[in-house]
Structure formats: C-alpha cells, structure tokens
C-alpha cells in the first residue's frame, strides 16, 4: 500500500493530525537522493513542544544552508497516533518527505530534559531501529545526541553512537561533512566513529568502559580504543555575533507552545547560581551586538508575519545594552502592532519601566524567583538577591497595579532547614500584607502563587556531589508548606516527587542506569514529562527488573574524589572551581557576578571571555 | 471606499488536516507579512477584521472556500492576489480575489447552503445505491444524532428539512454523493449527519476514516454568488 494513503487513513483517526503532516512555511525541500548526508533532527516530545525550541530552528537553518546536507524533522507521536502506527505497521517518518527514519544516515536527538529519555528509545523503536548501538548494523542510521543533558551522556551510552557536546552550530555540520567524506571513501561505521572521536565536542561512548569499585562507585574509565581522547572538551562557539541565526524560521502549522519570533541576545550567564547547570555549561557569555539583535528581529518579523517577538537568553536584563535595546524594540514593536515579551527579567527599576510600557493596562502577572526563603540559603545557592531586592520590587509592582504575583522556590537545596521553609511562607505573607498596606481593604482581587519545585542536583554544577532529599522528606516539606501557606490570597503549587527522583537518577546516572531506561521502555514508559502519560507503575516495574538502586543515585552524597560518570566530558569550567564553589556554599559565602571581576572558573583556558570585570567599578555585595 | 475584499481558495492535500483556526492564523500571518494592512476591531483585545465564509471541518478538502477581510488602504485585487499567493503553504491555492459590495453583511452571516462531494468505498452497486437514496430521501423524518453545543449530549434531530438535494453515483469502488445542505447561522447541517444516517440506512459499514469529504461550493442568500 502506498505510504501516503496508509498515512492518510491514520490522520483521519487521531487528534491534531496537523502534528504529522509537515509542509510548514520555510521547511526545507530537497531531494534526499541528491545530498551526501540525510539527517533527521529528532525532538523526543510532541510537535507543539519541539517546534517551540529555538535550538532546532538554529541547527535546521545551519544544516539546510549546506547543499550536501538535508536535515528533516521528526517528533514523538502522541499515544493515539503511536497506537495506530504500531497497529497498521507505519514506521516513524520524517515530516518533510515522509521517509522512515531508519532510512536516514543520521538520526540526531536533542536532549533537553532527562524525562524524555524513554521517548528517545520509543522513537527509535517506532522507527524500527534496534535500541542498542551494538545491535545496529551498517545499513542503519548513526544515532547521535546533543543538548544540555548530553553533558552527562552515560545513561544513554548504550543506545547512542555519538554525542555532540556543546554548541552545535559548527560542530554538527563539521561532523556531517566528516561523515560524507568517510562514506565517499567507503569507510565503515566504526572507521567513521574513530575519525569523528578526535573532533571537537565529539564523544563516542563505545570507545570507553567504566570499571566499578565494590561499593558501586566508578573506579576508573577505561579506553577501548587507544586513540580516543582521555577527555572530551565541549564544542565552544567563540562568538555568537558572527554565528548564523535563522531569519526564516519554520512556522508551526498547528499552534505550538510558543509561536513567535525569537532572537537570542546572548549565550551564557555570569551570575553563578550554584544549582544551575545552564549557568555553567553555556559559558562564557557571548553577546550579539544590539544592532544585530535588532536587525535579526526585524528580519524575522518581516519574513514570518509573527505578531509576537521574544528575546531569549538566560537572563534578559543582564544584556550589556539592555536599556537601549529594550527602548528601541518597544518603539519598533508598537509601531508594527507586535507584542514584545521579555522573559527572565531581573526586576529592578528599569525593568518596571519596561514592563509598564509593554504590558500597559494588561498586567498579566509578575513572576519572581527568589528560589530560597531566607538570605542564608540564598547565599548558599549564590542567588544574588536580598530581601530588600525582593520587597522593593514587589512594592513597586503593587503600586503599579499588578494583581497577581507568582513566586518560584526550590526545596531540598543543600543545607536547607525548616527555617528556610518558614522563610518561603514569610515572603508570601509579607506580600499579602504589603498589598493590604498599599491598596487597602478595597484593593480588589489579589493573588500570590507560590510554586515549589524539588531540587535535582545536576552534573557540572557546584552541587553535583550533593544529596537529593528522599521522597519522604519532600513529602513532609510539601505538607509543612501546605499548612504554612494556608493564607487567604495565597495559592500553593508543588511538583510530583516521583518524577524528581527519576530525573535525579538520570541527571547523575552512570552507564548502568541505561538498563533501567530499557526496562522502563519495555514496560511502556514514554512522554514521562506529561502528567497524563506518565506511568509510575511502568517505572516501578523497571526499577525492580533492572535492580537499579534509586537511592544510590539520588540521596547519596558524593565525595570530591569520587570518579563521576561524566568526568570524561570537560564542560570548560574546571572541577577545581566547582569544588571551591561547593565548599563556599557550605560556608554560606557568596561569589560575585563575574562581570565584577573574574572568579576563575577556567573557561578562559579555552576561549576568550569578555566578561571579566565588565562591570568593575560598580558597587557589589560580595562577602568573600 | 469600504476596502472589503474576499479571496476564493482551495484547501487540499495534507494541509486539510489543519483546523480552521490554524488556517486563520496562517492567513493572519500572511497578511502581516505582505504588508496589506488589515483593519482592526476596536476594544480591549483588537483583532484583524478577517474571517471565513464558513469554517471547513478538519479533514475536509475545499474547492471553493472564501475568506473575507477589510484593509486600511484600498488595493487592487491583482495586487492582493500577487502578494498573498507567495505566502501560502503547500495545499492552499488562491483562485481569485474580488471586492465585496458595501451593503452586504459578512459572508458568514449571509451563508445559506453548501455543496459537498462525499466519497464512500462500498461494494454496493449503483442501482442499489440509487434505490436506497430514493427511499432515504422519501422519508419524512431522517433522524441523526447531533451533539448539542451546550449540554454536549447526543440528541436526535430531524435533518430531512435541512437536506436540499442528494444525488448518488458509483465512481470506481466509491459511492459518490453530491449533497446540497443547509449551511450557515440560520440552519446548518453537517455532512457527518448525512453520512452516518445514510450509511446506517443502507447498511454500509465502511469506517469513517476510509471516506473523503470535499466541499465544492458555498451559496449565499439573495442569490449572491462568489
């Protein structure tokens, strides 16, 4: 039966069939037979999520600009579609040409969150691709993976042939060019991998094998191929100003989570919050010039007809010319009837002026993330925010008429006590009182939402050695907070404990946790990030079948001299720096924002860092 | 000048699996991109003055769909066609553009009937099908279950008065029904109701997903025709 006809019959029976049809404006149309390398860029989640991801747009643009490469897309089907595909024998296919993914040269997964790992396996399975790399012959695609979770690649080491660690703009096309050369030279897959493993940011897990101590920790990582590097330095794009950025992005054919023009203002962050992986692995800060940002924004808006523009970075207002940039964009977007959104804004006086201008009378809600309830704990995590910062800005917001304040906190942070939880409730209470004081008893509806997430220690952060709370501890803390936050006008939200523990297992898991993934996949787990699709029963069975101890990975504190599963990957920041930060955390000592003076993270061993002391001369609150 | 225009277009191929809201977003964006500025409604949440004559159900193809809009400045229909054509995704073909008279209501308000072609794979012969169709149309009441908007419950409705004409022929392995049905805000009959009631009437058990529906035309009150 013709594939198209078979597919059409499926499309008539599923929800949101637009997820599976392709044909978006600006999608790349090439003849797969006429290129050297065919790659499927795979996002292990639904279309609406994957299409909102800027990284895909960047790489799709970079790859398809090359004549010898054709990059297509594939997303995870929703369970209704998956069931029909399995029933009717329709393999997972690319959106652009409806080619089964097992006919590609490469399938490249982006790893944005740990709870997508089972979906990676499920997508391979739906594409009739054997899951374990050792079971895949020459005729099957090379399975690649990258993205922030690839900084601890080990849980997926048995399934992925090749990891691309770091900035992909140059690393990925270079890798595919290398593949094209090897293919033309008639080389086998293993010969290609041997060539590739010497390239920047490339990790081939099958060239290494960990050896374990009797207590289960890693003794050492042995090389199985002598020429493989002892340490894999992540690929680092020296600057973003000259990097190619899409001005003709794909436009989602059905409504995506984010459906708007996006310009990345800079990569990296100078703040050094100790729980934050992004703050480490994207160093150093690399800015685009203001003129480039504006030029890109205008081009994207003109080319797409989007009616919303957003800036993307880890901390929007840390951009060096933020005030000028914001001013110019506000004027431009107003003139063009485009709404402007500025996420991750640090709330200071200027930010208020900006917010006031762009939100005008539509004051949707103000989000603030103190992360911890007391100054002591905020110093531990190096979140450079004081009580005064919090309450001054909230007071401003209340005077300006915001009626809904959203607060984000983490619980289970290292050294946390119940005093810190009391601090969370105090902040909420003080905001309610403040509103009463400012707006009086007839101030109208006012609401504070307190959202609490569970701390998950991540690789390449100063807290990578820390213990996670047990499920019981989290539960007790949730209950405690629920009681404390029974305040009129306060809504309390918290995360599920089960998934935070699974997330933690894979965030710091070694190669053995791959078995757990495999078992979870067999038990039917996929799309675990979705409450409605998450199957705790499947995971329970998987833990049992794999014999993996959850606590070994979650609640166990590591010593600084333990060999960590991801030690093979060099994220650019030195381990010495991370250890020093971890020690300072325990001493409740903060580290300054490195724009106030270099703090010695070590990234400048590999690349020029232009942030060192960029703001020196301004007052700072360092208590070193 | 009222600057009111309509574009006639077809929707076919994979893009028929997008909803009419998705299509509306697509058109809105296309207008924005061409620089053909649409008039905006006044109020708290301004939106462009633009809309389909009738929404087309997800999964249906359309031969003669209409979208109307109002621009800030006058444009020639040729200019509109030329600019908009460049922005259409695969599967949307623009057929023509024309000005709307000032004195008519919106196309949506004036829509009156629509013509469909329904393709149903079946082993029944043309003779049998034609006889069954005569019997079906001769009933004074044709009861179909329709989901009520408010209660979400399936309620029986008599669709016979909303059926203007039905004609059936066998084309290859398919029964092809040409249906003219009430369409619009006054009275509306979804082809789905005809499909389900006719199939159960003559015992056709073809699953719905094997059938195709195409809207071939939309008709308006006062014999307006676009």
Image (cartoon, coloured by chain):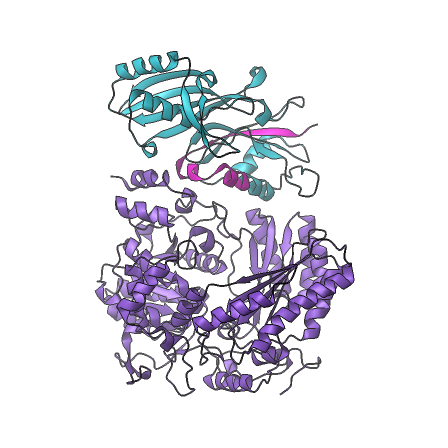
Chain colours: A purple, B cyan
Question: In front: A570, or A120?
Answer: A120
The x and y percentages for residue B137 are 38, 14
Give the quarter of the image for residue A396: bottom right
Q: Which residues are magenta?
A: B1-26
The x and y percentages for residue A369 are 60, 67
Q: Measured along the vertical axis of the image, is residue A77 above or below residue B103?
A: below
Give the quarter of the image for residue A320: bottom right
Q: Is residue A277 left or right of residue A107?
A: right
* Image label count: 0
The x and y percentages for residue A498 are 42, 65
Residue under the point 48% across and 51% down: A250
Q: Is residue A314 visible?
A: no
Residue under the point 27% across and 81% down: A226
Q: Measured along the vertical axis of the image, is residue B9 above or below residue A542?
A: above
The x and y percentages for residue A462 are 49, 80
Which quadrant would the N terminus of chain A be assigned to in this image? top left
The verdict on residue B13 being magenta is yes
Q: Is residue B196 left or right of residue A437?
A: left
Question: In front: A150, or A474?
Answer: A474
């Amino acid at each position: 039966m013709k594939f198209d006809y078979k597919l059409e019959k499926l499309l008539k029976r599923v929800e949101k069939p637009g997820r599976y049809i392709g044909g978006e404006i600006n999608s790349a149309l090439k003849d797969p037979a006429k290129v050297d390398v065919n790659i499927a860029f795979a996002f292990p989640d639904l279309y609406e999520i994957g299409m909102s991801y800027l990284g895909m747009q960047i790489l799709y643009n970079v790859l398809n600009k090359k004549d010898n490469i054709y990059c297509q897309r594939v997303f995870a089907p929703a369970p209704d579609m998956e069931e029909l595909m399995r029933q009717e024998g329709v393999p997972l296919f690319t959106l652009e040409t409806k080619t089964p993914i097992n006919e590609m040269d490469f399938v490249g997964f982006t790893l944005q969150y740990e709870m997508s790992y089972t979906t990676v396996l499920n997508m391979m399975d739906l594409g009739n691709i054997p899951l374990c790399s050792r079971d895949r012959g020459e005729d099957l695609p090379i399975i690649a993976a990258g993205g922030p979770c690839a900084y601890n690649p080990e849980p997926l080491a048995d399934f992925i042939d090749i990891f691309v660690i770091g900035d992909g703009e140059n690393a990925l096309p270079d890798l595919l060019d290398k593949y094209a050369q090897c293919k033309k030279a008639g080389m086998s897959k293993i010969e290609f991998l041997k060539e590739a493993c010497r390239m920047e940011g490339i990790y081939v897990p099958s060239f290494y094998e960990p050896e374990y101590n009797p207590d289960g920790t890693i003794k050492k990582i042995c090389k199985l191929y002598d020429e493989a590097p002892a340490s894999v330095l992540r690929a680092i794009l020296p600057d973003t100003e000259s990097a190619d950025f899409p001005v003709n992005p794909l436009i989602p054919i059905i409504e995506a989570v984010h459906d708007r023009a996006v310009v990345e203002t800079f990569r990296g962050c100078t703040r050094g919050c100790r729980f934050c992986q992004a703050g480490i692995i994207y160093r150093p800060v690399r800015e685009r010039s203001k003129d480039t940002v504006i030029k890109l924004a205008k081009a994207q808006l003109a080319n797409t007809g989007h009616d919303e523009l957003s800036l993307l970075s880890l901390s929007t207002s840390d951009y060096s010319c933020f005030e000028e940039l914001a001013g110019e964009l506000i004027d431009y977007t107003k003139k063009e009837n485009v709404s402007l959104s500025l996420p991750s804004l640090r709330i200071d006086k200027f930010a208020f002026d900006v917010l006031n201008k762009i939100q005008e009378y539509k004051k949707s809600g103000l989000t603030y993330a103190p992360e911890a309830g007391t100054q002591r704990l905020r110093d531990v995590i190096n979140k450079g925010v004081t009580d005064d910062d919090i309450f001054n800005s909230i007071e401003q917001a209340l005077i300006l008429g915001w009626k809904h304040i959203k607060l984000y906190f983490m619980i289970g942070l290292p050294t946390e006590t119940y005093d810190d939880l009391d601090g969370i409730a105090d902040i909420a209470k003080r905001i309610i009182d403040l509103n009463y004081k400012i707006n009086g008893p007839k101030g109208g509806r006012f609401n504070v939402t307190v959202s609490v997430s569970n701390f998950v220690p991540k690789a390449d952060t100063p807290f990578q050695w820390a213990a996670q709370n047990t499920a019981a501890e989290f539960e007790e803390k949730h209950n405690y907070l629920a009681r404390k936050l029974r305040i009129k006008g306060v809504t309390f939200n918290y995360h599920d404990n089960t998934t935070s523990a699974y997330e933690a297992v894979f965030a710091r898991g070694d190669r053995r946790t791959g078995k757990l993934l495999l078992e979870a996949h067999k038990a039917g787990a996929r799309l675990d990030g979705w409450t409605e699709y998450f199957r705790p029963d499947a995971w329970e069975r998987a833990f049992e079948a794999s014999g993996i101890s959850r606590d070994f990975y979650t609640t166990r504190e590591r010593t600084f001299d333990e060999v960590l599963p991801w030690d093979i990957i060099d994220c650019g920041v030195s381990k010495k720096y991370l250890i020093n930060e971890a020690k300072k955390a325990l001493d409740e000592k903060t580290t300054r924002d490195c724009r106030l003076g270099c703090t010695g993270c070590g990234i400048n061993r590999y690349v020029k860092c232009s942030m060192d002391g960029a703001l020196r001369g301004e007052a700072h609150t360092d208590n070193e | 000048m009222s600057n009111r225009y309509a574009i006639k277009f077809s929707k076919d191929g994979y893009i028929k699996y997008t909803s009419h809201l998705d299509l509306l977003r697509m058109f809105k964006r296309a207008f924005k991109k061409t620089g053909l500025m649409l008039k905006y409604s006044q109020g708290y949440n301004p939106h462009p003055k633009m809309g389909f004559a009738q929404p087309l159900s997800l999964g249906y193809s359309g031969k003669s769909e209409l979208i109307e809009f109002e621009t800030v400045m006058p444009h020639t229909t040729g200019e509109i066609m030329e600019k908009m054509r460049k922005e259409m995704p695969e599967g949307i073909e623009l057929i023509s553009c024309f000005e709307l008279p000032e004195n008519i209501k919106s196309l949506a308000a004036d829509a009156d009937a629509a013509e469909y072609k329904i393709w149903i794979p079946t082993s029944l012969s043309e003779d049998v099908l034609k006889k069954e169709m005569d019997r079906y149309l001769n009933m004074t009441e044709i009861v179909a279950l329709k989901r009520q908007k408010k209660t979400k419950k399936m309620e029986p409705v008599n669709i016979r008065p909303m059926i203007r004409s039905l004609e059936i022929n066998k084309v290859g392995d398919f029964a092809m029904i040409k249906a003219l049905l009430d369409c619009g805000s006054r009275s509306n009959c979804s082809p789905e109701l005809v499909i389900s009631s006719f199939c159960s009437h003559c015992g056709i058990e073809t699953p719905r997903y094997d059938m195709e529906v195409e809207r071939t035309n939309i008709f308006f009150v006062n014999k307006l025709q676009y």
